[in-house]
Amino acid sequence: MSFNLKISNFVTKTIRHQYSWSSIVNSRFTSTDSKTAKKPKTGILMLNLGGPENTNQVYDFLLRLFSDKDLIPLPAQKYLAPFIAKRRTPKIQDQYSQIGGGSPIKKWTELQGEEMVKILDEISPETAPHKFYVGFRYAEPLTEDAISKMEEDGVERAVAFTQYPQYSCSTTGSSLNAIYRHYKGLNKVPQMKWTTIDRWATHPGLVDAFAENIKKELEKFPEDVRNDVVIMFSAHSLPMTVVNRGDTYPAEVASTVNRVMEKLNFSNSYRLVWQSKVGPQEWLGPQTDESIEGFAKNKRLNLLLVPIAFTSDHIETLFELDLEYIDDLAKKAGIKSIRRCESLNDNPIFLRALADIVKNHLNSDEMCSKQLTLRCPKCINDVCGPMRVFFRTNKLV
């Protein structure tokens, strides 16, 4: 799989594409360079997990990941995190070597950001010029460094735009906590006005993009089995300890699945399954690998995997789904035909959706969603409360 993108061809293809949302129906991509010297009025911080660009970066990536108490609370974390990271590094390096030597998520995020701000400069001139910034949690460019760059650039309005469509305290919550901790650590209120797009699980553009990709992939199955294909929506799982605290992620992922199936007129049978379980504790299920084996036993031998909580390709799609499950597990289980739906990556509908989401947010009076103001009923993280105050008021408590 190649990640060398030809932007000029992509832009030409995008201009020809038609969309259904009235707010962006007449907008077009332009060749304007978003990295101009002009001071950006609006800065959009694209938040995501990140990934090592080469195998030499794997240890640092894992160390940051296992040091994050919001994601993986560990006893004696200061000592255990380096131990676990060092122990797992060779295995993860091998996995990245099998998908081209590193994660493509930075390349995809930068492409998405470039095209998003081009559209925004046209459809929202009153908030232009716009500039995107990449803020990864565990890989460079780190969230804290991106914030410093935004302040240095003199951004007036900053939007923390999560690239996880469905909110979880372990993902979006961790990134928003990092923004709050950055200012708290400096004991300094931000120069910029901060707001956040903290979830967008049912945005029409997201739904349309998924539905389009699914339709295209279903067409690749033989006609005589196409209606028998089981659509397996696969999302990253969560430990049940997190779910039972009241994390909204499972419900929000399910809402995306339901909207996509509505768009498809419920053309096929489907299930929501969960992947990437780590460790011995109980996780949200059923697991994707176990579900593939279960469908094989039940003689449902034509499957379509859809990464419903991932918008860009990375190790969970390229290695776990493509290599572990499709190339290996499915063959051993006796699956007759199995395919994976393309990730959204450079899907033109998806790129326009990103711009539409930001435009709608900028035009609203919302600092954050109403859901963000509500902590989980069994929340145990002391930072979650102050973070929510920060994004409602821009004040440090």
Image (tube, rainbow, N blue to C red):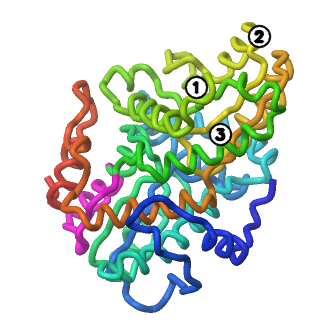
Occupied quadrant, residue 249? top left
- 114 in relation to 215, above or below: below
The stretch drawn in magenta includes residue 190: yes
Residue carrying label 2:
299
Disc 2 or 3, which lies upstream in sequence? 2
- 196 in relation to 339, above or below: below
- Judged from this view, the residue extending furthest toward the bottom is 37
From where the camera sits, is residue 91 visible?
Answer: no
Q: Name the residue type under label 2.
A: Lys
Image position of 301 (left or right of 207): right
- 338 in relation to 389, above or below: above
Q: Name the residue type under label 1.
A: Lys
Mark 1 neighbour class, 10 Å CA radius: few under 14, some 14 to 19, many 20 or more: some
Pick whichever, 346 or 374, lies toward us: 346
Label 3 to label 1: alpha-carbon separation:
11 Å
Query: Please, what secondary structure does the residue beneath circle 3 have?
Result: helix
Residue carrying label 1:
277
From where the camera sits, is residue 285 visible?
Answer: yes
Residue carrying label 3:
316
Q: Residue at x 55, y 40 (%)?
A: 82
Mark 2 neighbour class, 10 Å CA radius: few under 14, some 14 to 19, many 20 or more: few
Pick whichever, 344 or 159, lies toward us: 344
Which span is picked out in magenta?
A: 177-197
Image position of 327 (left or right of 55): right
Give coordinates of residue 129: x percent, y percent.
38, 83
Query: Please, what secondary structure does the residue beneath circle 1 have?
Result: loop
Pick whichever, 375 or 369, lies toward us: 369
Comparing marks 2 and 3, which lies closer to the viewer? Answer: 2
Give coordinates of residue 51: x percent, y percent.
61, 52
Q: Residue at x 71, y 26 (%)?
A: 227
